[in-house]
Image: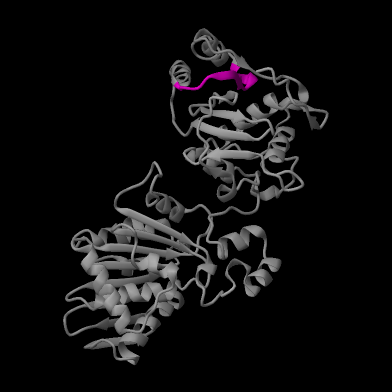
Amino acid sequence: MKNWEQHCEYKREWFKFTDYIPHRGQEKVHFPEEYAPYRVYVCGRRFGKTLSAAKELEVTMSLPETRSWIVAPNHNLTDLVFREVWKTCVHNEKMDIRSKSNRKGEKYLETPWGSTLHAKSAENPDSLIGEGLDKVVMDESARMKKIIWDELLQPTLADRRGEGIFITTPKGYNHIYDKYKLGQVGHKEKDPDWYSYQAPSWVNQHVFPGGKRDKFLRSVKRNLTKESFDQEYGAKFTTYAGKVYPFDRYMDTGNFPYNPDLPTYCSIDFGYRMPAVGWYQTDSRDHIFKIDEISHETNIKTEVLARRVLAKPYRVVKYFGDPAGTSIGGSGLGDIEIFRRHGIKVHYKRDKVSKDISAGVEHVRSFMESADGERKFHVDKKCVNSIDDYEAYRYPEDEGKDLKLKPVKDGLHDHTCDETRYFIINRFPIRRGRFTLLDRSW
C-alpha cells in the first residue's frame, strides 16, 4: 500500500474518534512492523479478536468507494463482528449510513460515499464468488476450509489489490499454520506479501489483569489438558491425541549454532524417495542439540546425498543409520555401501532391543522430556522441517496412545523421526530397558 504511514496515522485518528483504545496486542494487529497485503493474526480466546476485526473494517469503510467483506465459518460468528461495526456506525452514529440491513443472511452497510460492507458465511461458498474487494477479514479462519481462501476469497482481491486479514484462534497444524509461516521474518518460507503475529490471551490486560498468572486462567488451566490450554489461550499451534513425542517448539527450539568444541554426529534415514539427515552435537550433561537437517526433499539419489552430506562444514565424529541400508538396491549396491565408497562409514545396531521401534521411541521420548520434567533435546530453529515432523509424528488414531504401538509411517514425517531414533539409540545405547553412556574419548 502506498503511504502506509499516512494510512496508519489516519487509522489512529479513526480510533480516537470512535473512542477505541487498543491494548498492546491489538496495536500489533492494527500497526504491524511492516506492511503486507495478507496478514495472519493468531490469538488466544478473549484477546479481543472480534473488536480488532471490526475496527479494521470500519477504517476501510470510512474511505471512499471501498468494498469489504467479513467472512466467518457461520452466520453466528459473522454476526459478532458485524454487530461491533453496526454499534459504531449505526447505534453510535459515528458514520453516515445510506442503506443498511441487519437481517440474518442479509447484513450489509452502505455509505453515501459509495463504500460497502457485507457479512458473509463460509457455510455458503457460492456467496463468496464475484465482486472485486478492497478488504476481506476472515474471523476464526482456522475453522474454515482451505478452499475458502485459496479458490474463492483471494481471487476477489486481485483487481483492486485488496487486503486479506486472517484473525483466529489456532486449530492444530492446518492451513492457517502454513499461512502463518509465510509471514514469519527469518523463516525460509517467508513471503513479502505476508505478515503474521501471534499473541496469547493474557496480552489483553483488561480481561486478564494478572497476566499469565491471572486467577481465571489458573482456574481454566486446572480443567483443561495442556494441549487445549496452549491452543485456546496460549494461541499455540499444537497437536492432540496420538502424538508420539512431547516435543514443544516453544520450549525446545532456539539458536543452537555449530560449536566446534563439541562432538558432532550425523544420522541418516535413507528412506524411500525421501531421505532424512540430521546433524547433532552433545555436551557434558548429555543434552542433545540438532544443528542442521536435510529433509522433505524427494528423489535424491544416494550418491548425491552422500556428496551433500560431505559438503557440510562439520567435523563429524560418527555417522549412524538404518541397518536396512545394507539391502541391495537397483544399482546393485546398498545405500550404506554407496556411502562407504564416498568415504562415509555408517554405524548401526542390529540387536533386538535397538531394532525394536517401540523401545526406541520410548528412549527418544525420555530425552525430549524425562519423567521428572527435564528436557535434553534441543533443535535449532532453522531445522523447520524437523520441528514440524516431531510435532506431527503420530500413533494410529483408532488405537489411542498405547506406547507399545508403532507410529504411523506416512512417508513424510516419519523419516526425520527415524533418523533421530537411530542417532539416540547409537549414541546412548539401550541396555535392558536402560541406556548406557558411551565412552567420551571422542
At which x and y percent is residue 74? Answer: 44, 72
- Of 153 and 203, nearer the camera is 203
Q: Is residue 288 left or right of residue 37?
A: right
Magenta stretch bounds: 312-325
Q: In this view, does 421 lie to the left or right of 150?
A: right
Is residue 299 part of the magenta span, yes or no? no
- Residue most extreme to the right: 432
- Figure check: 431 above or below 97: above
At which x and y percent is residue 108? Answer: 30, 81
- Of 398 and 167, nearer the camera is 167
Is residue 322 part of the magenta span, yes or no? yes
- Of 412 and 290, nearer the camera is 290
Q: In which quarter of the image is the C terminus?
A: top right
- Figure check: 86 above or below 347: below
- Residue most extreme to the front: 261
Q: Which residue is drawn at 32% across and 56% down?
A: 151
At which x and y percent is residue 201? Answer: 53, 68
